[in-house]
Image: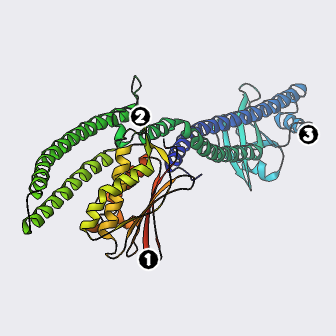
Amino acid sequence: MPLSRLRLRLGVWFAVAFLAGLFLLDLSLYGYLRLQAYRRLNREVRARAEALSAAVLQEFHELPDSGLAAAAREAMREWQGPTGAYVVLDSSLAQVAALGPADWVEATRQPWAIAGEWDVSVGPERSFREVMVYHKEWPRFSAVAMVSAHGMEEYNEALALWLTVSALLVLLLGLGGGYVLSRRALAPIGELEDAIAGISPGSLGARLPVNTPADEVDRVRMQFNALLDRLEAAQAQNRKFLREAAHQIRTPLTLVMGEASLELQRAEGDGAGVLRRIQLAAEQMQRRVDDLFLLAEVQSGTVPPLDELVELDGLLLEVADAMRGRAHQLGRQLQFREVATVSVRGNRGLLREAVLELIENAVRHGAADARVELGLVVEGEARVVIASGGTPFVLAEATSSAPEHGLGIPIVQWIAGVHGGRLESRHVAGTNEVVLVIPLSSR
């Protein structure tokens, strides 16, 4: 199944919107967790500095005569705290005792406020330190604790990596999920497509259902229903015009044919020939008017009633008798092949028009010295065969607007189609065979 561009676009926008929301959430989550990590580290360093201060103060109270420096060194010697750098400063911020890596201890040699917290870079590591004044009375001193922030940085980097990977996974899942979910979101569009596809030119009275309250799809349905109203009105107006035009044209043609037929009974010589030509021209004009009216019905999508039981063999014989005079006028002969006895369900008038049109085409466009052969065979379906010598032709060409083919073939194809059949043609040994195929149980 090919990818739907509309569903793909909806899926992309769904994923982008979801990703934007997730990005803001991840960004705030990362900032919060990073801040909490720094706060935990601050509390840890402060606790170490406080523990160091308490140890120095204890040693000083135990040996008050030894002084602050001795107490600080003794506290450092007995210190069992976590790995790091520890420094004790006197009231003048001079170092009196230190413990830890020399470069860490050296990093504490910079001015600071009475108490504070700093990030200090020591070699390749990023370190955090805290300085606080523990005792403002005697003895006045400051305890400094410094620990590596390397673990916290690794934690922050891992957190950032995890959030980035999760965002990419969410993007992919959002794209796939959005594409799948858009199918449900676009289901009303598919239903609208099916409903529109079910409306043919002959069923313009149908209307699409509209829900209340109307959404975007329902508003499209309303607009389409309004279009159907306009098309139905235009179709009705065209049919009315065609009927009136056909009636107005048929009336004088009927009068001309009647007068010509009446005068032919009394006319002699050249006058009779003129009257025959007038009568023939009037008959052709009436046929063309009928064809135009029927073609208009075809194009409007009208479905005629197909409930008659039609004897095709009798119909073929009837049309052949009606066309013998016409064939004789054009110097052609009609001849029968095998004619099987078969009946089909359909519209007798339309089937008669189809056979009449096929014989007319064969008589008019076939080779002048070739007979027109008529046949009816049953091969799982009824096949009315009209054969005539002449140059090969293709039905696709016969249904074009080329003047030499007229309107007949499209009409015959429509008649075959509404009966569930088809029109076939083939050229065999210099003979064109056109076959009207009708199922034995049409409709």
Question: Would you say 255 lies left or right of 341 here?
Answer: left
Q: Residue 388: x, y in percent?
A: 39, 70
Question: Would you say 430 lies left or right of 286 here?
Answer: right
Q: Is residue 304 above or below residue 63?
A: below
Between 378 and 402, the residue placed more toward the observer is: 378
Q: Is residue 410 visible?
A: no
Residue type at mark 2 is Val
**Which numbered disc, 3 or 1, marks the residue that appears first in the sequence?**
3
Question: Would you say 311 lies left or right of 247 here?
Answer: right
The residue pinned by badge 2 equals: 217
Q: Is residue 329 above or below residue 80?
A: below
Q: Secondary structure at mark 1?
A: loop
Q: Secondary structure at mark 2?
A: helix
Separation of disc 2 and disc 1 at Cα?
58 Å
**Which numbered disc, 2 or 1, marks the residue that appears first in the sequence?**
2
Residue at figure coordinates x 64%, y 34% from the top left:
32
Instruction: Select label 2 or label 1 by which is in front.
Output: 1
Q: Secondary structure at mark 3?
A: helix
Q: Residue 23: x, y in percent?
A: 58, 41
Separation of disc 3 and disc 2 at Cα?
83 Å
Residue at figure coordinates x 73%, y 46% from the top left:
158
Between 282 and 258, the residue placed more toward the observer is: 258
Contact, mark 2 vs mark 1 (Cβ under 8 Å) = no
Quadrant in the picture for residue 283: bottom left
The residue pinned by badge 1 equals: 430
Quadrant in the picture for residue 143: top right
Label 2, residues with CA under 10 Å away: few <14, some 14-19, many ≥20? some
Residue 77, numbered circle? 3
Residue at figure coordinates x 61%, y 45% from the top left:
176
